[in-house]
Amino acid sequence: MLEPDYVGDCMTASTHFDLWLDGAQQPATVDIDNAPGAYPKRDLTNYPNGLSAGSHTFVGVFVFDGVVTQTVTVTILFT
């Protein structure tokens, strides 16, 4: 179960996930589930038409309470 202060920190606008694709920040929709004992917060990005063939670099930036806590970079070749 999450501690009350932790829940509050997670629900602020200063805690989020930013996704960058090929150097451009992607729009996201915030989704929060109200489950017993947890409040998962997700920043969702959708590509309804897929992505073009070729190499694409994704950079994910995790921000907790206004501080970048992790950055992950992955390059994927779409064929």
Image: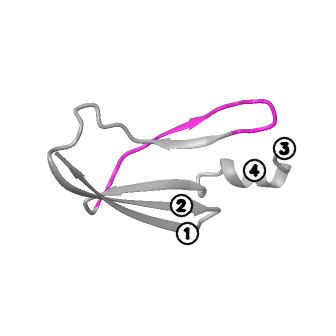
Q: Mark 3 points at which residue?
A: 1
Q: Are marks 4 and 2 in contact (CB under 8 Å)?
A: no
Label 4 to label 3: alpha-carbon separation: 13 Å
Residue at image point 65% right, 62% down:
65
Q: Mark 4 or mark 2: which comes first in sequence?
A: 4
Upstream in sequence: badge 2 or badge 3: 3
Q: Is residue 72 left or right of residue 41?
A: left
Residue 23: x percent and y percent? 27, 63
Report whether 48 appears left or right of 53: right
Task: Give whichever of discs 1 and 3 has the lower sequence position.
Answer: 3
Could you tell me the amino acid type at mark 2? Phe
Residue 14 location (% of width, % of height): 59, 58
* 17 relative to 11 in the view: left or right: left
Amino acid beneath label 1: Val
Read off the magenta span.
Answer: 24-39
Residue nearest the viewer, comparing 2 with 57: 57
Q: Is residue 54 left or right of residue 18?
A: left
Q: In what element is the residue under mark 3?
A: loop
Is residue 55 located in the magenta-colored stretch of the structure?
Answer: no
Does the residue at mark 2 contact the one at mark 3 (Cβ under 8 Å)?
Answer: no
Q: Quadrant of the N terminus?
A: top right
Q: Which mark is residue 8?
A: 4
